[in-house]
Each structure stands twice: as structure tokens, then as C-alpha cells.
Amino acid sequence: TLIFGVFLSQMGWGDLGAFGEPSKETPNLDQMAAEGMLFLDFYTANPLCSPSRAALLTGRLPVRNGFYTTNGHARNAYTPQDIVGGIPDSELLLPELLKKAGYTNKIIGKWHLGHRPQFHPLRHGFDEWFGSPNCHFGPYNNRERPNIPIYRDWEMVGRYYEDFKIDLKTGESNLTQLYLQEALDFISKQQASQQPFFLYWAIDATHAPVYASKQFLGTSQRGLYGDAVREIDDSVGKILKHLQQLGISENTFVFFTSDNGAALISAPRQGGSNGPFLCGKQTTFEGGMREPAIAWWPGHIPAGGVSHQLGSVMDLFSTSLSLAGLQPPSDRQIDGIDLLPVILQGKLIDRPIFYYRGNELMAVRAGLYKAHYWTWSNSWEEHGKGIDFCPGQSVAGVTTHTQEEHTYLPLLFHLGRDPGEKYPL
Amino acid sequence: TLIFGVFLSQMGWGDLGAFGEPSKETPNLDQMAAEGMLFLDFYTANPLCSPSRAALLTGRLPVRNGFYTTNGHARNAYTPQDIVGGIPDSELLLPELLKKAGYTNKIIGKWHLGHRPQFHPLRHGFDEWFGSPNCHFGPYNNRERPNIPIYRDWEMVGRYYEDFKIDLKTGESNLTQLYLQEALDFISKQQASQQPFFLYWAIDATHAPVYASKQFLGTSQRGLYGDAVREIDDSVGKILKHLQQLGISENTFVFFTSDNGAALISAPRQGGSNGPFLCGKQTTFEGGMREPAIAWWPGHIPAGGVSHQLGSVMDLFSTSLSLAGLQPPSDRQIDGIDLLPVILQGKLIDRPIFYYRGNELMAVRAGLYKAHYWTWSNSWEEHGKGIDFCPGQSVAGVTTHTQEEHTYLPLLFHLGRDPGEKYPL
């Protein structure tokens, strides 16, 4: 059994046609959902990129794997190039474990778990890497703060904007095509050598600044952001087709999801949509943490399946180990669960979802109920500067601009009747 | 060619699984969409029940067919039992015209175009009726304001709550089952006699007060409203299956849509969801007028089709006439267009969408652009009483509580990039 992950950068629930995006421009992802299983209650472990990715690869909450801050209440932690931290050596990453079962592991795209040499993905279980340690922010073009580098394995092969062009004016960049080709080549090589593999396809589109290849520019009703979504959709379709053409689709478990909700501060030009959900990235409302999620495994997962299992990106850690016939490490707490009984036998496993922001447990979901112990969108100070995590949305006492504690009387929502968290019980 | 309409009471865009409702509890409607054509840019002619239904049956805007008010600026008009007005005799209704082509016409459910004898549906082209002149508001149970009657053809056969039970405590009522059986029986009868028919299935679920039959109570994650949606979904599935079993599905054009957006003032217990759109019923924002819409006609409409044609409920008038080989009346302005070239040949017809509220043209959509000439949600006075047409939503200068004129500088939105009308250009 082979494993293969698709992990997108802040694509929102409402960005897929299958989830009600009104332009309906994702035929390949919709097809993937129709052939596989849709998870309707699937969550990230943190509404920000670095901790979410750390949680996926360790199967552990950010408060356990180190991706949290204590220096600012409810502040999320991430690792831009001016932060010296990264994934601790003491953490066991999924690729490190998969190696024991003979897997070749490749990361394509954004690592985000530290850019210093000791945090290099090839030191943490990956055999190959094509991509960047951080987001393609920039351009900086100066000595103190250079543009983000791109690596091929150990070697830096260039920098965004300089050697890997992104035209901020037109939005043109062929990066997604490079990452697609890299994926297709890796899959071909592994298939030829009959080696099991783990591909972590963590491309950095649709993160702002948004880009798309020339052939996708102007093709979406949604503007440049939609062009980027279309290109990703097309790429996923090509990868799935490639697996089918190589005859290994029935041996390949593919999971599609995103690292956090759409970044509404960048919407609509540079950010996506969380559909009916409240707020977006950075928040512990549904819009920040509920993710589109699709499992695809022809011949194993019944087509058109739908699951209401409360799932988490951390489950991909445990599920992948299970697929590889491995046990999760027993010397530490693992927060992910094995979803195979859910996916293959339609079971529902009782488990809560924890919504963290930094080191603060903001909310918990159990069944259809969600209790907020703290509410906060963003500060009045930021809000005054035009930064809004919940543009166009305002629920009195819920989308607060001060950090409000509800520990003694949690703010309760029924997510079945009220998925948009508009009517506290 | 036979015709058959499904017209629901204030079901919202966001209430269908295919449109991203997070509980995904509408497998039959989703299947109907997968087998037919989804209209993603389909509108009602007014965000209120009576004028919307008048527009559907006349192919004309409410300002032409009389369903508007002049006594209150931007106030919608509808016909509860204490209003003496109704559809003028001078209007030509779809069933009146279809008669000329030998159609038998039946209305099942809510008429809403006047309850006085001169407005009776059998005086306006329908041959059969089982249903009520108005919504099942109530119970009133008094002489001055009795409960709403139910008619079989000319005869009143009972009243809601009295003879047709709705248990407001448990939410139980078998009305949708009665209306379903009535539809199945009518279809069987017409098939047996080889007569073409027009069935206008205008059941009054999911209008508040919401109800569902016993076997559907408690089956939805969404509570009673969701139970009602599930029952409708199940009913539509049974009707389509019945057409298939009788071997007439390839001769029957079925269209599913709703009369206005979800009534957010009743949400979440008694009202639905407009997904990513702004506000709801009574407003001229997308949430008030953009409707889920599905055309189904096996063997004619290619499965899985998606259309971005700007469509309107008034088009069902013109399209139905076209299907019946009839010409629309030439002595009056018809606002609907024939959608057959869109449905059968994938064409896109250039036409605007007008958003009226009462007799005021509030907004116009052309292509992906929408211009608001007036903005208004509801008054401060109502708002102070807890009535909110846009709960949890607030866009500065857009969801205004006073009537704001923008005639000289319309408020412009790009509905492709910003379907939620959150970012004025």
C-alpha cells in the first residue's frame, strides 16, 4: 500500500464546487469526491500554516510538538525566515517512521517547520525535497532579508522571484506546473522501481501572493485566486490520472485537504472562501479550522461516500502508519486516530476536536456541540488598521475584538442546526 | 413533451448537499443535479412568496403583473388571508396557455395569488388543485381569523391544524406525504390516459412553522428544519423514480427551484441557509434572490451539466411554452426567456437580472457585475425588536438599516470574485 498526501495552503471549505462554491470550477476535485469519500467534519489542528503542518507530520497537537507560543496569549506560532526555531529533533515525523517499512518519502513544496540546517526535511525523514522552507512572501531582494530559497534536496537551487519567477503584476508563475511535474516524475520513478512511497505534495498555491500559470490566467470567474484554484484542480486531476495510467491507483491512498481555513484578510483577490462558516484563518471559529477533505482509493473506498466522522489532519499520521502496517510510537501522546475503520467500514469513532490558538484551548467540539471557552477574532488595534479576520461577519459576543473568557459558562453552539456559529444556545 | 414543476417555499441555496450544506442530507436532489443540469446563477423575481409565484406563472416581473405595493417604498407585496387582492384577470397564466396544447394542469400546494373566489386557481387555468390559498400560518382558531383552508378543486375540504394536523409542539405533520401521494397519483392518471400534463408541485414545507412526517422527525443533524428538507428530498426522489418506472421520464421536463432565499429571521430552527450569500428573504442581496435550481430531463439534458446562464423563475414560463410548442403572448411584455437553447445546446444568452423590492428597482446584475441602486436590509425599528434579515452579517454601507440611495453612484460588486457581496468595488 502506498501513501500520498495533498496538502494545500489555506484553501477554504467554500472553494470547491462540491462544497458549494458558486462558480463551480473544480471538476477534478469534485470528481475525486464523487469517486471517493467526502469528510464533512474534518479539522486542522491549528488555524495557521506551521503548527498545522507540524501536527499533520507528528500526529500531535501543536502544544505537544512545540509549535505554539507562550509569549503572547492565544497567539499562533509560525516559522517565517526571521524565526530561528523549528521542529524539535525529539519529534518523530511520519516519514521517519515510514522509512522502517521501506518507504521513499518526498516533500514537494512548502516545509514550514524551520529553515535552519538542523530543521531541514531530509534530517527529519524525507529522502527528497523540491520546494521551499517558507512561504513565497516577498519580494525582499535585499541582503538582510533575502527572497525565500528553493531547495532540491540539500541544495539551494534558487530563490523565489529571482530564479523562480512570480510576476506580482500579472500574477503569472509556473510554480504549480513545476510542482506538478515533480510529483508525476517521482510517482513514475517509484512505480518503475516498485518502491512504496510517501509523497507529501504541499504546494504553496493558493497562499497569497496568489499566482497561476499562463494557461490558467483569466480562466476563472473568481479572478486570480480562482485561476490558482483551477490550476490546482487540474493538477490533482492529472496526478490521479497518472496513478490510474500507471496501474497503481488501487495501491495508492490519496488524501486531499488544506492546512487552515481561507485567509479572509486576503479575500477576495488573494484569498478564498469558507462557505457558510464563520471567520477564517487565525481564528478558532469553523471558518478557521474546518477543512475540505477527500479520501480517494479506488477499489477500497466506495464511490460517493460521505462521512461525518470528526477528523483531524493529525489522523493522517495515524492512518498512514496503519496503512503501512506500522504502530504509532508508544513513548509519547499521539492525538491522531486511525481512520481506516471509518473509511473502509463506515464506522464512527467517538472523539472530540480541540481548537487551539497558540497555547490556549479556545474551544472543543463533541458530537454536534461546540463550546467556546475563549472568543477572539482580532484586536481592535489591528481592526482599526483595516485587518479583519471576519469581514462582513459580526456576531454579537462571538466575533469579539477583545479576548473574552467563557470558561465558567462556555458559549455553546449546535453545529448541525447552526454550522455558521451565529446563534449561541 | 410533458412539464412538471417543483417550486419550494423558501428553501435556500445553502440547504442542498450539492451546494455545500455541511450535513449533506439531500442525496436525491444531489442525484437529480448529477443526472441533470445545475443552474448556478438562477434567480427569483422577488424575494417574497406571492410576487415570486406570480412572476413564475405569468413570466412577468411583479411590477407588471400587479404583485407590488406603491403604498410603502421598497415594501414587498404578498397576499395573506386578510388582503383582498390577487392575480388580475388580465394576466395570462402558464396553465391557461398550456390548455391550448391539450395539457391538464394541476397545482399541488400553495397558490398564494389571492384567496377570494375570483382568484381561485381553477379560474386561472388549472384543472385540479389540492392545497391551500395561503401559507399554513396559524393556528388562529377564531371566527375573525380562521385557520387557512385546504381545497380539493373548488371545494374546501378542511383547514390546517383542524382537519390537516400540524403539531406545533413536536413539529409532526404528514402534509408533505399527502402532497407527495397527490403528485404520484396525478402522474399515474395522466400517464394512463396518455395526456400531457403540467404539474405545479408547490408544497409549503419548508416555510415556517416547519413540520415533517413522523418517519422523518429527528433524522437530520439540522433539527426540524433539516427533517423537513429530508422529507422533501425523499419526495422528489420518489417522484423522479415514479416517472422512470412509468417510462415517461424522457418525456418529462422537471425543474426544481425555490420561491425566495432562506428566511433567516426564522433560522436556524425554522429557517434554512443561503450558504455563502448575503442576507436572506425580503432582501435584494444574493441571499434573498439567488436560488438553487436543477433541470432534469433524462435523454435530453446531459448528465452533470452546469450552466452559468443568468436565469429567472420567469424563464420557466417561456421555457414551458416552448416545450409545449406554444408562442408566448404577443400583446404584453414577457420578461422570461426560453432556456431550451441553454439547456439543450449549452448556449449562454445575454440578459440582465433585475432585483426588485416592492415597486423599487434595487439592483441590476449584468454578467458578473451587480449594481445596487438602493440598499436596505430592514429598519432600525424592526431591528430593535430582534428582527434581522442578515443575522451575523454586517457589511458597512451595504446591509443598511435605513434605505440608502446610490442612484448616482451605484454600489458595485463583482459576483465572481465576491459572491457574498462583502467588498464593494
Image: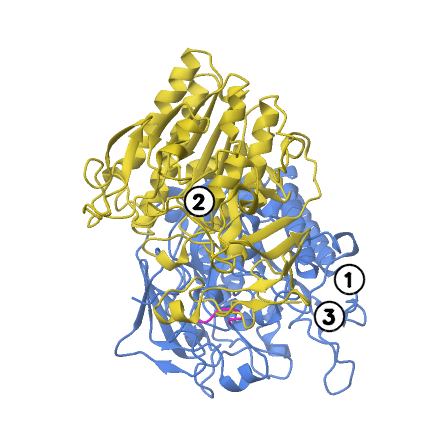
Chain colours: A yellow, B blue
Both on one chain, marks 2 and 1?
Answer: no
Spot occupied by residue A186 in the image (x, y as percentages of width and height): 38, 21
On screen, residue B11 versus residue B144, left or right, reads: left
- Residue B172 — which label? 1
- Residue A176 — which label? none
Q: What element carries label 3?
A: strand
The stretch in magenta equals: B390-394
Residue B391 belongs to magenta span = yes
Both on one chain, marks 3 and 1?
Answer: yes
Spot occupied by residue A394 in the image (x, y as percentages of width and height): 49, 69
Q: Is mark 2 on a helix, strand or loop?
A: helix
User: In 3D space, how far apart are the residues under numbered discs 3 and 1 (Cα atoms)?
Assistant: 26 Å
User: Mark 3 highlights which residue?
Assistant: B155
Spot occupied by residue B240 in the image (x, y as percentages of width and height): 61, 44
**Closer to the camera in the image, B27 or B137:** B27
Spot occupied by residue A160 in the image (x, y as percentages of width and height): 24, 40
Q: Are marks 3 and 2 in contact (CB under 8 Å)?
A: no
Q: Quick check: can you spot residue B298?
A: no
* Rendered-image quadrant of the C terminus of chain B: bottom left
